[in-house]
Amino acid sequence: MRKYYKTPLLVLFVFILCSILSSCRHDRVVNTSFYFWKTVYKNNKTETACLGHFKSHQLYMRIMDVDLDENGINPVPVSPITFQDKLPDSVEIIPVVFIVNNLLKVTTRHQLDDLARNMVGFVNGKVRQAGKTSFSQLQIDCDWTASTRENYFYLLKQLRQLKELKGKVLSATLRLHQIKNQKGSGIPPVNRVMLMCYNMGNLRKYGQQNSIIEISELKKYLGNNVTSYPMPVDVGLPLFSWAVAFRDKQYIGIAKRINMVELNNKNQFIFIGNNIYRAKTDLPDDGLKINDEVRWENVSAANLRSAARYLAPLIKADTVNVIYFHLDEAIVRTYTYDNLEKTDHLFR
């Protein structure tokens, strides 16, 4: 009889123990932030309210691009941001500098030394214009390749050695091909990376695909490559749409002025199926001619949740930083708070 009761009692004990351990487990922390990728910053009630709603204490702000000058010799700032207003006191600025990959093919080590110093000096000036006395993190954005890796990593190392960045976090953006091909792309010498989970398809290929985000594409690149990455990984998710234009099935660019209002104007476009529209007339202001085709690409709330559902188990940290690209009044109105909260919740 004693042997008969032993197994049920053991099962009951294990069940109670698991219940206690489960009740002690806490959801991990999810920090929600946004990129600001416009060339002029001014206070916007809708955008500021969005930051407040999500308790976003950091804003990743593009400070400038860095490209070669008109003579193709020296790196110079391109389209730097202008501050018409100060940032809210509750929001910390995280400056972001975009490095054009091609300049790394021709710059010397001496030029890169100068670039590191000049870049930080320029960033400090813009941070003060934003009404801030300092910053805790500098992020460098560059789609480096195997041929530019050596110069790019050298630049990052020079930045880390500058006294102005002592005690600060240096982060870098990480594209899907860079996390998959770690042997060829290398591991950047930074403190943490921001994984760009967007712009993953072939933008220039004619067809009905969505080049902004496709879960099937994510799965081709990530998996264990995220889990085993040797530094903290933040997650960047897209909140944008665009009109990809083709002429005779050849890519001609992004029609920046085109949105769904124009596409649904039957005097201008005819809907030919799925996400493809054909111009019914010349539209010179948009750079389009009659019979040009436009592929409308966007990111639905369902897309975001699918991406979060796939990514969440790959991030093993107790805290995950989710950064949406990007903060803009029109975008905030398109993606409701509820949409983003449901996406954030999947990371917990």
Image (cartoon, rainbow, N blue to C red):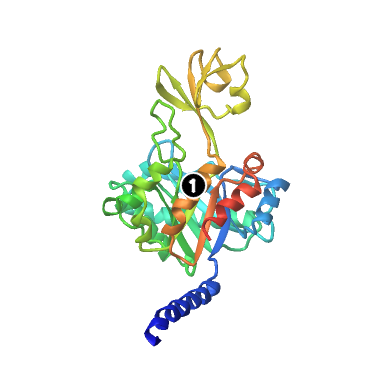
Counting from the top left corner in percent of width and height, residue 70 is at 43, 36
Q: In this image, 162 relative to 48: left or right? A: left
Looking at the image, can residue 54 be seen? Answer: yes
Q: Which residue lies furthest to the right in this view?
A: 45
Location of residue 101 (image quadrant): top left
Q: Which residue lies furthest to the left in this view?
A: 183
Q: Residue at x 65, y 39 (%)?
A: 330
- Quick one: label 1, few (<14), some, or many (20+) residues within 10 Å? some
Q: Is residue 141 above or below residue 262?
A: below
Q: Is residue 43 above or below residue 193?
A: above
Q: In this image, 176 relative to 78: left or right? A: left
Q: Is residue 6 above or below residue 298?
A: below
Counting from the top left corner in percent of width and height, residue 276 is at 49, 23
The N terminus lies in which quarter of the figure?
bottom left
Q: Residue at x 44, y 60 (%)?
A: 315
Counting from the top left corner in percent of width and height, residue 234 is at 47, 57
User: Which amino acid is tagged 1?
Assistant: Ser
Q: In this image, 287 relative to 249: left or right? A: right
Q: Which residue is drawn at 33% across and 58% down?
A: 187
Location of residue 246 (image quadrant): top left
Q: Which residue is drawn at 63% across and 26% down?
A: 261
Q: Residue furthest bottom?
A: 2
Secondary element at tag 1: helix
Q: Which of 61 and 342 is in front in this view?
A: 342
Number of dots carrying numbers: 1
Residue bearing the label numbered 1: 306
Looking at the image, can residue 144 be seen? Answer: no
